[in-house]
Image (cartoon, helix red, strand yellow):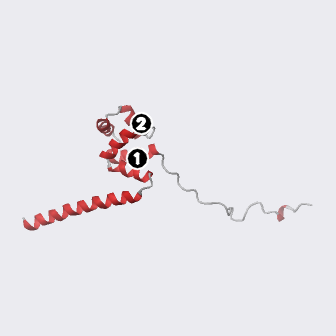
Amino acid sequence: MSPTQKDRKVRSESGRSLLQRPVPEPEPSFAEAIADALRREFGGTPGAVKKVVRLTRANERAVRNWFEAKNAPSGENLVILMRHSDEVLEAVLRLADRQDLVAARKLSAAREKLQEMLAMIDDIETG
């Protein structure tokens, strides 16, 4: 004899399972991360595409595809972009899980700006 409907518990009262874990947000793909970095650094205008074309000497259609995250740049073009764009450099370091290098680069840049500001203050005081 089987238990009645009232005796069965198919679901927990809260509706949650003990095995449910929060689903982590998916990491952006390589092409998406580079596209986001390009848009932050150069903007999303046709002029930005042309600027990247001049820097990399890549085909304009290919560069538009990078901005739209349809494709990612080749290794050679990626190195050129990293040379000219801090945003692209940081995106690659984040994808490589090297936040320590991102932090070190930001600290170095902040130190340089602070030195510039101190030099400006010295000029004002002596001027």
Is disc 2 surrounded by few (<14), some (14 to 19) or many (20+) residues within 10 Å? Answer: some
Q: Can the viewer see residue 43?
A: no
Q: Is residue 26 left or right of residue 117?
A: right
Return the x and y of residue 14 as percentages of the image width and height.
68, 65
Give the Cα distance between marks 2 and 1. Answer: 12 Å
| Residue 120 sits in quarter | bottom left
Total marks drawn? Answer: 2
Compare residues 72 and 2 and report the one nearer the observer.
72
Q: Mark 1 points at which residue?
A: 36
Q: Is residue 45 left or right of residue 95?
A: left
| Residue 102 sits in quarter | bottom left
At a point 89% along the width and 60% down the height, the residue shown is: 2
Q: Quadrant of the N terminus?
A: bottom right
Compare residues 60 and 5 and report the one nearer the observer.
60
Label at residue 90: none
Return the x and y of residue 108 as percentages of the image width and height.
29, 60
**Mark 2 residue type:** Asn
At a point 23% along the width and 60% down the height, the residue shown is: 113
**Mark 1 residue type:** Asp
Q: Mark 2 points at which residue?
A: 65
Return the x and y of residue 26 as percentages of the image width and height.
52, 51
Question: SS class of the residue under badge 1?
Answer: helix
Question: SS class of the residue under badge 2?
Answer: helix
> Where 37 sits versus 76, above or below?
below
Q: Say whether disc 2 or disc 1 marks the residue closer to the N-terminus.
A: 1
